[in-house]
Amino acid sequence: MNRADDRQVQIPEHIRITLVATRHPGNIGASARAMKTMGVRQLALVAPSGFPSAEVTARASGADDILARVRVYENLVDATRDCGYVLGTSARMRNIQWPLINPEQAARQILQQALAGTAVAILFGTERTGLSNEDMELCNAVIEIPTDPEFSSLNLAAAVQIICYELRKAAMEQFAVTQAPVSKMPAATVEQMQLFYQQLEQYLRDIGYYHPGKPRLLMRRLKRIFNRIQPDQSEYNILRGIFADAGKAEKEK
Amino acid sequence: MNRADDRQVQIPEHIRITLVATRHPGNIGASARAMKTMGVRQLALVAPSGFPSAEVTARASGADDILARVRVYENLVDATRDCGYVLGTSARMRNIQWPLINPEQAARQILQQALAGTAVAILFGTERTGLSNEDMELCNAVIEIPTDPEFSSLNLAAAVQIICYELRKAAMEQFAVTQAPVSKMPAATVEQMQLFYQQLEQYLRDIGYYHPGKPRLLMRRLKRIFNRIQPDQSEYNILRGIFADAGKAEKEK
């Protein structure tokens, strides 16, 4: 693409880079800078250390508008409440079987979802340890950034840079060839899915379907299964309907 | 690609990240780290400031072997003397008409050249001002890293990260044909899913959840929803279990 086209490449506003429990303030600043170079604008911080601070501002190197608009949350559920598509990131997956997606594929899907009106959150965990299992449970999929297995210690801002770079590439691609969005309706939000899981859990209690002593493990597996659906609003209503009627039927027994 | 393949992805030794007149020692360390995460090993420095130093080592975060093997040159001609393919990098091209290439295309060409035995140098200019015209004259082409035209101030180590990331992607592409399966277990077969849908339909009849007169339409929508899960065998059993227990409970009423 040429220079003129370049200026028209827009990354949708409601793609939110979400840094979870960042320990080094410099990484927050460097992440803001990384975002801005690629035209990604929304930054959310969950329980950050040392924000705001002079170090954050110094490392942002002029990405001040992003810092000025940062939203800070106490926990990840609050930060993702309105999001319909949530992706974790990892430089190296642990044993847990989570649907993995590479950065390039992820960027395309994120863009399609965002263009359909869905708010998207991309999660980056704490330095060194990454996202917790509890964080992962909110995710529809996990972006695996390819690294050398012998040294996968990717800097936090470097990870943000790679993902935002792929988002820009995807936006340039989309600008060149327009694609049909996955769905014309916005996706179900995290808040809605939380309600659904509560209902599902209640239903499973009602019918007595629980591995004895391991209710949390079962719910985690079910979340992994159902998060893959990424239902839109209408599909969400169907899913809710199924178990709502069952609950009613059970109670009437 | 799976884990085992991953370990065999090798970036050829004679691809040399060449930092020209770097002013901030921290950027040298961060670049070494960025290289190592992607399996790129050869670093050359042309007239660097503050190398070696504690700051370089700190920011390298364990990429010590790369620092130990760094070659330092007085000028760029010396640094590139043995190279057969030299690429400049720029976040935003000036007026100069130089053959431009994007990072993805560049990575593929670099790999091909290197696999054919050619030593390759990838040049990164001074912070703020980038490569000089004199530096450019040594280049076969210039890699343009896409950035937002309104803020193209890419950090030096972030630029190195993007290029090395594309090199790793290109090496993986060259190596692999298949992608990592989501699960190590075989997926549920079509036949199994048919059984699941029969069971689901029976369950929906039992609980009386049907749009009046439109049972087939509902089942079609449900198939569209549940097919997205692509369950493996173990997940399939969980799904079957949920509705089996419900069916039993319903019949016992």
Image: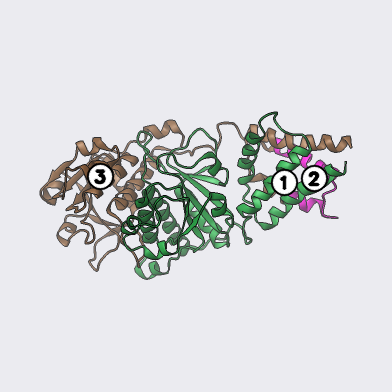
Chain colours: A green, B brown
Chain letter, disc 3 residue = B
Q: Quadrant of the N terminus of chain A?
A: bottom left
Residue A125 falls left or right of residue B158: right
Type of residue at label 3? Gly
Q: Name the residue under label 1.
A: A199
User: Residue under circle 2?
Assistant: A247
Q: Give the range drawn in magenta.
A: B192-220
Q: How far apart are marks 1 and 3 (CA)?
A: 51 Å
Q: Name the residue under label 3.
A: B29
Distance, label 1 to label 2, CA atoms, is 8 Å
Secondary-structure class at tag 3: helix
Q: Is residue A83 above or below residue B44?
A: below
What's the amino acid at mark 1? Gln
Toward the viewer: A178 or A101? A101
Q: Give the main secondary structure, helix, strand or loop, of the magenta stretch.
A: helix
In the depicted structure, whether residue A216 falls above or below residue B212:
above
Instruction: Label 1: state its secondary structure.
Output: helix
Task: Label 2: state its secondary structure.
Answer: helix
Question: How far across and down, in percent of the image, does residue A115 sit?
Answer: 54, 62
Q: Is residue A66 above or below residue B13?
A: below
Answer left or right for B90 relative to A11. left
